[in-house]
Image (cartoon, helix red, strand yellow):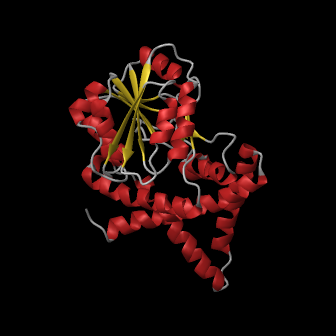
Amino acid sequence: MYSFVIPVYNRPDEIDELLYSLTQQDFEEPFEIVVIEDGSDKAAVEIINQYKNRLTIQYYVIENQGAGKARNYGMSRAKGDYFIVLDSDVLVPTNYLKEVSKALQEKMTDAFGGPDTAHFSFTPLQKAINFSMTSFLTTGGIRGKKKGIGRFQPRSFNFGVSKKAFEATKGFSSMRVGEDIDFSFRLWQQGFETQLIEKAVVYHKRRTSLDAFFTQVFRFGVARPVLNKRYPGTAKFTYWFPSIFTIGFFLSSFLFVLGQWVPIILYNMYFTLLFMLSVLENRNITVAFLSVITTLIQMTGYGLGFLKSTFFSPE
């Protein structure tokens, strides 16, 4: 049996939308949902009660411990033998469980991950952030695709793990950011295999403001050097790309003030190409314009966080 494990922190409206999407699953076998209220000021208990006649739900309220610990708490109390961890800001298509079950029947692994994308109902900013996080011109276009990824590292917004693997690894670590990547590495260390299920897609809202998005990617950047130190064999030169981009952008802007045009023109060409690709993909000028802004925020936020963690915040 599958158990969805969903931590929630001050997002009752989002958990409402997620639970509704789970009522629409085209899946005949029973499944359960475990919601963990992680010390929220805005409790979701009223929302949960509205779904108890439509879904099998366990609901727990704990002191704030962070998403990783909340997920572990939920998995330790789940009744299923395969757990599916979701973030509260996702929506699940009707065929999600059917695709997961089919893929695991064809190739059983003790952990899996799936892609994320934007729903047509999302705001232009949310669609722009999705583009920046998944585009070939920003992340290489390999996020959520099998080609070129090597061993797949599931992300916590869409992360499946067997009860056996959870009990062997003790689940997520105490890291507040990067805990899902850390979990993947520890799964591999203990001999468990992961896979990408390409059709196990979720619609991921991500952040709803530019400030929140910058904070998120900055923390991602801070986490990567910590992971590199914990697992030296996993470090890659490509992790430096956002930092190189950031240093080059600020240097080009400075040279532009001094009358040197060529470096900034190269960046303008990149952003123009990014804009055009976003127009083609999203069919929306506003989303394309915002994609330029969100990409700049993504690259500089991650790059600055990476540099700070590498040179000024040793583990």
Asked if residue 190 lies left or right of residue 80, the reply is: left
Q: Residue furthest bottom?
A: 258
Q: Nearer the viewer, residue 279 or 15?
A: 15
Q: Position of residue 166 (x, y in %)?
A: 27, 32
Q: Is residue 219 above or below residue 105?
A: below
- Note whether residue 241 is visible: no
Q: Residue at x 59, y 75 (%)?
A: 252
Q: Nearer the viewer, residue 150 or 37?
A: 37
Q: Position of residue 8 (x, y in %)?
A: 43, 45
Quarter in which the N terminus is drawn: top left
Asked if residue 86 lies left or right of residue 248, the reply is: left
Asked if residue 224 lies left or right of residue 174, the reply is: right
Q: Residue at x 32, y 23 (%)?
A: 79
- Note whether residue 215 is visible: yes
Q: Residue at x 48, y 23 (%)?
A: 100
Q: Position of residue 124 (x, y in %)?
A: 69, 52
